[in-house]
Image: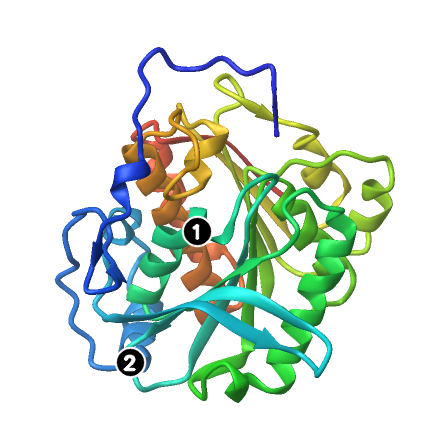
């Protein structure tokens, strides 16, 4: 949700971006990385031994991706959730990112992000929850989903590393991610895509978070998410925040469900998301991603960097 929004004069319509070929979604042609690891372990070793390069993550990763649309995530005989599952083709155990949409949105608006992550070895699950909230209830549902996968990852796929679950949310979905972390979801940490929140109960909830959090924000001079400042102010420690120059709130989706987003800035968001997810899953923190963002700051892609 946006307030004080100043919109670009030129609109790019992204509905046509989701091209289907043989039932499999394809990414926009961002090129393919020259890295050719045979396993996720090889990729992890490379990432740990080399300086993080954000431009590298603008490219599709080295692994093929298998997609399962409308995957039924059944937690019990009476409780299930609908999701789109994207599995990386490597044989190793790898991290899992669980992505939650925002207000009046859907799991489909994070398809390219999920495919991109999976191409880099990070299995991805885009979950559909009630898209008008209530977001505290959605956060508790997300925590329950994470706990179920943590206990029984083989119900999703035997290659999921249950110790490396990462929660990602956009807009009000990011508020739900923060609630899930505060509820003690068994996650390595959270990545908030231009988060928004409404309600005076959230500051106390955010104060209970003790997992690493990365906030990837839009440009506040283009569009300012409602109460975005709450997240950095009230999460007591372990939070990093950076803004993407010229990006609108909708650029944190890919494909976006409105025409204001631009592909170039969506790719910047997905490359930053990929860098953050790989940094957290390989090293347990966002240090490598932070270094890659610093390089981007020198080229005026990022600004307002801060962490505590």
In terms of image quadrants, where is residue 51? bottom left
Secondary structure beneath label 1: helix
In terms of image quadrants, where is residue 268? top left
| Disc 1 crowd, CA 10 A, few/some/many (<14, 14-19, 20+) | many
Q: Quadrant of the C terminus?
A: top right
Residue drawn where x is 42% and y is 34% of the image: 251
Q: Is residue 11 left or right of residue 258?
A: left
| Disc 2 crowd, CA 10 A, few/some/many (<14, 14-19, 20+) | many
Circle 2 is placed at which residue position? 90
Q: Is residue 180 left or right of residue 120?
A: right
Residue drawn where x is 55% and y is 65% of the image: 82
Note whether residue 291 is visible.
yes
- Which dot, 2 or 1, sits closer to the camera? 1
Q: Position of residue 17 (x, y in %)?
A: 26, 42
Please give the label number shown on residue 108: 1
* Relative to 37, residue 238 above or below: above
């Amino acid at each position: 949700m946006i307030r004080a929004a100043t919109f670009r004069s030129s609109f790019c319509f992204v509905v046509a971006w989701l091209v289907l070929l043989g039932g499999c979604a394809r990414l926009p042609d961002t090129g393919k990385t020259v890295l050719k690891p045979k396993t996720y372990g090889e990729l992890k070793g490379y990432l740990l031994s080399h300086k993080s390069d954000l431009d590298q993550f603008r490219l599709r990763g080295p692994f093929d991706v298998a997609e399962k649309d409308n995957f039924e995530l059944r937690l019990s005989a009476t409780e299930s959730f609908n999701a789109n599952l994207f599995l990386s083709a490597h044989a190793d155990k790898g991290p899992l990112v669980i992505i939650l949409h925002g207000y009046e949105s859907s799991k489909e608006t994070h398809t390219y992000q999920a495919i991109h992550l999976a191409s880099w070895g990070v299995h991805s699950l885009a979950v559909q929850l009630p898209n008008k909230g209530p977001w505290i209830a959605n956060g508790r549902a997300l925590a329950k989903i994470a706990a179920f996968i943590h206990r029984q990852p083989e119900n999703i796929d035997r290659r999921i590393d249950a110790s490396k679950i990462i929660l990602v949310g956009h807009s009000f979905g990011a508020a739900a991610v923060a609630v899930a972390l505060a509820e003690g979801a068994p996650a390595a940490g959270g990545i908030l895509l231009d988060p928004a929140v409404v309600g005076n109960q959230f500051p106390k909830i955010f104060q209970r978070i003790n997992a690493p959090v990365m906030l990837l924000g839009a440009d506040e001079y283009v569009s300012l998410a409602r109460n975005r400042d709450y997240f950095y102010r009230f999460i007591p420690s372990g939070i990093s925040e950076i803004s993407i120059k010229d990006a609108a709130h909708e650029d944190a989706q890919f494909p976006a469900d409105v025409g204001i987003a631009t592909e170039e800035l969506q790719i910047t968001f997905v490359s930053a998301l990929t860098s953050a997810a790989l940094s957290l899953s390989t090293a347990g923190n966002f240090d490598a991603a932070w270094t890659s963002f610093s390089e981007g700051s020198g080229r005026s892609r990022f600004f307002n960097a801060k962490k505590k």
